[in-house]
């Protein structure tokens, strides 16, 4: 399937869902509905009677509350909370029990950095410790390799 076909298919599904939401009316005895495009991004609530309503709380609000309470964790995520006015830095997530240096080397964005030789076309020709690694520029520019990471 081509990207154009996939996009068209996804757009048709989205249009179908939006039509369903616009025409939604709760079953007899339901508590009413506020499901409409203005509630996009909010948590959907299913009542005990099986009726669906849109909540007023977003997923981001819930995650923010869990982080603040210290109960939200993500595997292999390092966090740092900064209070600039009081100059206080507090480690969060997996960084809580870590100390500077070797504790962080297990994470590629810290421990995966290596000196390397890079040719003019961007190709890495050697890493520090390889027999052909040179710091005199004869095997390309001397740079530091930084693994990809997301924040």
Image (cartoon, rainbow, N blue to C red):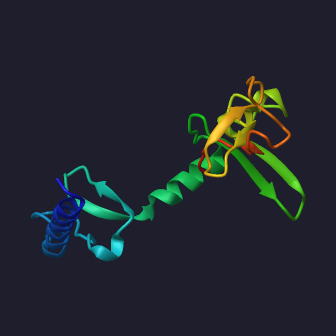
State whether residue 73 is above or below residue 9: above
State whether residue 48 is above or below residue 110: below
Decide which of 93, 34 is in the foreground and name it. Answer: 93
Horizontal placement of 91 versus 150: left or right? right
Horizontal placement of 41 versus 28: left or right? right
Q: Quadrant of residue 126?
A: top right
**How many numbered dots are placed on residues in this image?**
0
Residue 130 image point, x, y percent: 73, 24
| Residue at 85% in and 34% down | 100
| Residue at 80% in and 34% down | 134
- The answer to whether residue 9 of the structure is visible from this angle is yes
In the image, farthest residue toward the right = 87
In the image, farthest residue toward the front = 138
Decide which of 87, 105 is in the foreground and name it. Answer: 105
Q: Quadrant of residue 135?
A: top right
| Residue at 17% in and 71% down | 15
Residue 5 image point, x, y percent: 17, 61
Residue 60 image point, x, y percent: 50, 59
Horizontal placement of 9 versus 60: left or right? left
């Amino acid at each position: 399937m081509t990207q154009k076909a996939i996009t068209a298919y996804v757009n048709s599904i989205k249009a179908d869902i939006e039509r369903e939401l616009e025409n939604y009316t709760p079953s007899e005895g339901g508590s009413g509905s506020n499901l409409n495009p203005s509630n996009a991004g909010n948590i959907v609530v299913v009542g005990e009677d099986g009726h669906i309503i849109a909540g007023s709380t977003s997923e981001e609000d819930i995650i923010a509350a869990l982080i603040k309470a210290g109960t939200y964790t993500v595997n292999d995520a390092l966090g740092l909370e900064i209070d600039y006015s009081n100059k206080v830095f507090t480690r969060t997530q997996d960084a809580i029990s870590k100390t500077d240096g070797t504790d962080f080397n297990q994470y590629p964005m810290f421990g995966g950095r290596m000196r390397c030789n890079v040719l003019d076309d961007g190709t890495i020709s050697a890493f520090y410790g390889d027999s052909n690694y040179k710091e005199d520029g004869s095997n390309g520019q001397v740079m530091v390799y930084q693994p990809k990471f997301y924040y």
